[in-house]
Image (cartoon, rainbow, N blue to C red):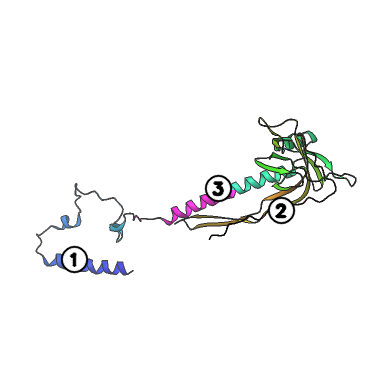
């Protein structure tokens, strides 16, 4: 309304100034009829007070574009999360046959023998033998009695006996056997002790100047294995006469006193 009042006042002043100037006499017909100017083409629509400001305004930054990009990013993330959830749900709800379970377990690097019985005596004394085994995409150096944490192993429960068949290296005080890349005659026996969760890891994502921040937490599922036996290498027998081993006592060195 304020702009319109200013325009009306300017129009009054302009008409007053033009009327004061001397105009040549015109006939009534020439005054009433309007002669078109060939140099200026005016559309048929009547000119309004805002016709002079009909051009579009351009800004350096557009909020609509930023909002559209944010919406697109959120839609992509939501679709990715939905796809991951669908894949996980399909894997959990899928019924595996015994052959499929065995083939997938062998591809990861283990074989399930069955549950541990009360009569089984799988835990043995320490032996000076070590092995390097591969489970999934990780490698572990283990010996008899060690416990390791791996990523969650499928198709096995607590107290199940396993055979780790991807043995890359065997070693003892007398010999070392290296696989190319796997030793076919070697095997490492283990028992599943528990399924646990690792410590929480914070995932923070940020895109500057986009008002985009996302914080998520993740706890990796783990499986704890206890190594019970290593097979495929000659083991040195430890001879004990029933007497406790005495530690070697070092004689104190004689230091000559400076004169």
Residue 70, magenta (yes or no): yes
Image position, residue 159 (x, y; %): 82, 47
**Callout 1: few (<14), some (14-19), or many (20+) C-alpha neighbours within 10 Å?**
few
Q: Is residue 82 left or right of residue 74?
A: right
SS of the residue under disc 3: helix
Q: Is residue 251 left or right of residue 212?
A: right
Disc 3 + disc 2, Cβ < 8 Å: no
SS of the residue under disc 1: helix
Name the residue beneath numbered marker 3. Answer: 76
Q: Quadrant of residue 229?
A: top right
The alpha-carbon separation of the residues under discs 3 and 1 comes to 62 Å
The alpha-carbon separation of the residues under discs 3 and 2 comes to 70 Å
Q: Residue furthest right?
A: 119
Residue nearest the observer in this picture, 218 or 41: 218
Q: Quadrant of the N terminus?
A: bottom left
Name the residue beneath numbered marker 2. Answer: 249
Q: Nearer the viewer, mark 3 or mark 2?
A: 2
Image position, residue 206 (x, y; %): 50, 55
Residue 203, magenta (yes or no): no
Comes first in the chain, label 3 or label 1: 1
Q: Quadrant of residue 21?
A: bottom left
Residue nearest the observer in this picture, 27 or 179: 179
- Up/down of 146 relative to 187, above or below: below
Q: Nearer the viewer, mark 3 or mark 1?
A: 3
The alpha-carbon separation of the residues under discs 1 and 2 comes to 122 Å
SS of the residue under disc 2: loop
**Callout 2: few (<14), some (14-19), or many (20+) C-alpha neighbours within 10 Å?**
few
> Range of the magenta residues?
55-78
Q: Nearer the viewer, mark 1 or mark 2?
A: 2
Q: Quadrant of residue 120?
A: top right
Residue nearest the observer in this picture, 227 or 111: 227
């Amino acid at each position: 309304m304020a702009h319109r009042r200013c325009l009306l006042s300017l129009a009054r002043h302009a008409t007053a100034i033009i009327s004061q100037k001397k105009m040549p006499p015109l006939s009534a017909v020439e005054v009433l009829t309007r002669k078109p100017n060939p140099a200026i083409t005016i559309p048929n629509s009547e000119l309004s007070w805002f016709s002079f400001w009909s051009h579009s305004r351009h800004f350096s930054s557009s909020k609509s574009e930023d909002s559209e990009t944010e919406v697109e990013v959120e839609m992509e993330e939501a679709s990715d999360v939905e796809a991951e959830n669908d894949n996980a749900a399909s894997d959990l709800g899928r019924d595996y046959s015994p052959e499929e379970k065995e083939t997938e377990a062998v591809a990861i690097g283990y074989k399930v023998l069955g549950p541990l019985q009360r009569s089984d005596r799988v835990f043995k004394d320490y032996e000076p033998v070590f092995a390097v085994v591969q489970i999934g995409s990780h490698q572990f150096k283990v010996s008899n009695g060690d416990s390791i944490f791996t990523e969650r192993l499928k198709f096995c429960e607590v107290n199940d006996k396993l055979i780790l068949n991807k043995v890359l290296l065997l070693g003892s005080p007398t010999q070392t056997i290296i696989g190319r890349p796997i030793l076919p005659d070697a095997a490492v026996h283990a028992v599943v002790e528990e399924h646990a969760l690792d410590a929480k890891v914070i995932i923070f994502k940020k895109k500057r100047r986009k008002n985009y921040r996302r914080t998520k937490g993740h706890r990796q599922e783990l499986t704890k294995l206890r190594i019970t036996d290593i097979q495929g290498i000659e083991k040195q027998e430890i001879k004990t006469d029933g007497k406790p081993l005495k530690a070697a006592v070092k004689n104190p060195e004689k230091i000559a006193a400076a004169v």
